[in-house]
Image: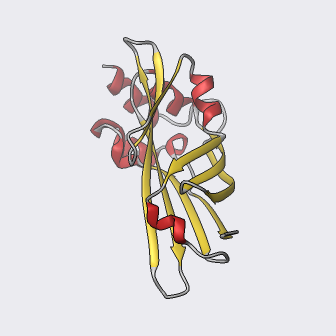
Amino acid sequence: AALGALALGACSGPAPGPMPQAQIVQAALATGPALEADLRLVFSPTMLEALDRGIPLTLSMELRADTRDATRLVERQRLELRYLPLAQQYQWLESASGARRTFPRRTQLLAALDHVRLALPASWGAIAAGTPLALTLTLDRSALPGPLRLPSLLARDWRLPEARHAWPHAG
C-alpha cells in the first residue's frame, strides 16, 4: 500500500521542496587504490519519503581512465542507500566491496555522501600521472521497485541530474 501511494504521489506532480540536484565538486585517485569524491546531492522530498519507507535509492558511479596506450579502464560501482525499519537504522552499501556503514539518522547518512571513498581494483594503482579521468554519477532508476520505475521516468522529483567531473590524474 505504501509503495502504491508513493507511485501515485510521484505521478501527481512534484512535491513541495527542493528539486533533486547532483554535483561532483572534486574527485581524485588516492592510494589504496581508491576513488575519493566530494559530492553535493540534494534529494527531493519524494525520494526522501521513499527512502524513509524502506525503498532503497541506488547511486551508480562510473570511473573512466583513457591511458596513453589507448587502453580504457572502466570501473562501475553502486552505492545503495536504504532504511532498515526494524533496526531503525539507515545504511549505505557499496556493491564492489560489500562494505556497509550504518547511521542512526537520515541526516547522518546524507552528510556522509559529502565525501565518498570507494576501493578500486589494483589495476587503478598503476595509472600514470596526467591520465585523463572522468567520473559520472546517476540515480539507478532500474534498481527501484517495479511500481516506481515508470513514475521515476515521468515525475520531475525523481530526476536526479547526471553529474560529471573530469580531471587529469595527479599521480
In the rendering, at what x and y percent does residue 76 appear? 42, 58
- Judge from the rendering whether residue 142 lies leftward or rightward of residue 155; answer left or right: left
Tell me which residue sits at (50%, 53%) in the image: 138
The N terminus is located in which quarter?
A: top left
Q: Quadrant of residue 34?
A: bottom right
Q: How many marks?
A: 0
Seen in the image, is 132 located left or right of residue 83?
right
Q: Position of residue 63 (x, y in %)?
A: 51, 63
Name the side, left or right, on which 4 lies relative to 29: left
The correct choice, above or below, for 153 with respect to 2 in the image is below
Q: 19 or 106, which lies in front?
A: 106
Residue placed most toward the observer, 160 or 153: 160
At x 52%, y 36%, the residue is: 13
| Residue lying at 39% horizontally and 29% vertically, measured from the top left | 55
Furthest-left residue in this view: 146
* Residue 104 higher or lower than 124, as above or below: above
Q: How is the image coloured?
A: secondary structure
Q: Residue furthest bottom?
A: 69
The C terminus lies in quadrant: bottom right
Residue 24: name its quadrant: bottom right
- The residue closer to the viewer here, 123 or 165, is 123
Residue 88 placement (x, y as % from top left):
45, 13
- Whether 148 is drawn above or below 28: the answer is above
Residue 8: image location, x then y, percent: 39, 30
Q: In this image, 84 relative to 1: left or right?
A: right
Q: Identify the residue shown where x is 65% and y is 47%.
A: 39
